[in-house]
Amino acid sequence: MKNLKLIALGMILITAIGCKDSKKSSENEATELQATEATYSVVNDSTKVSFTAYKTTDKAAVGGVFKEITLTNTNPGKTALEALNGTKFSISVSSLFTNDATGTRDPKILKFFFGVMSNTELISGEFKVSPENSCSIDVILNGKTANIPLKHSVNSDTSFSFDGVMNLENWDALAAVASINKACEALHTGKDGVSKTWSEVAVHADVLFNKN
């Protein structure tokens, strides 16, 4: 009789532990399912692209934006960066805007910088994300393709910013740099009397995502 009671007690304990493990397993499966169902997608008309160019030997900054950016080949992803990977972009060069009060800077840049390069109606390329979540963009300019490594910052789970440096020699664009420097020689002359336009351009992008 005593043995029967011990066996019954053991069965009760095993059943209780089994139920507890089953409940825990169900909770884990629910959490995993919820994580799997969460997807991100790029908000196509929200991306903003800006740049900072430099003049004079003191490296005075000249900022600007491109107002027309088109994104294609966008796909949903389990993370924001996964959703952005493989996205292709096309930037209208004519949408350049540097907020110059005189209204003379933008036409000069379009004529004496972009105008002396090949196929510069658009700046196009593709966003790339490695398995380690390092980011970069392949950029097509002047008929050449080169890569710009990017640093990214998370503003929120649906807002990311990206920064990189474009060295124009990688696109064989030093002749364009010399052209714009000559056209703006006086404006690009510093206190030392030297006129200089830098081949280094900082690029920045803000991208928004939908989270479903």
Image (tube, helix red, strand yellow):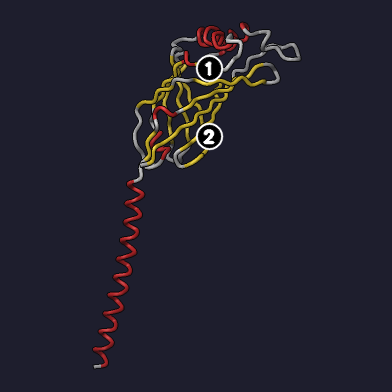
Q: Is residue 188 above or below residue 150?
A: above
Comparing 139 with 29, the one in front is 29
At label 2, counting other C-alpha atoms closer than 10 Å, the crowd grade (few under 14, some 14-19, many 20 or more) is some
Q: Quadrant of the C terminus?
A: top left
Residue at 28% of width from left, 87% of height from top? Answer: 6
Please provide percent x and percent y for residue 93. Answer: 47, 15
Q: Secondary structure at mark 2?
A: strand
Number of numbered discs: 2
Return the residue found at the far bottom. Answer: 1
Seen in the image, is 128 located left or right of residue 15?
right
Specify the amino acid type for callout 2: Lys
Quarter of image, res 191: top right
Seen in the image, is 68 located left or right of residue 168?
left
Please provide percent x and percent y for residue 33. Answer: 32, 51
Q: Nearer the viewer, mark 1 or mark 2?
A: 1
Q: Which residue is mark 2?
A: 151
Q: Which residue is mark 1?
A: 97
Q: Quadrant of the N terminus?
A: bottom left
Specify the amino acid type for callout 1: Phe
CB-based contact (under 8 Å), mark 1 and mark 2: no
Seen in the image, is 99 located left or right of residue 195?
left
Comparing 84 with 139, the one in front is 84
Comparing 104 with 120, the one in front is 104
Residue at 47% of width from left, 31% of height from top? Answer: 136
**Residue 69: assigned label:** none
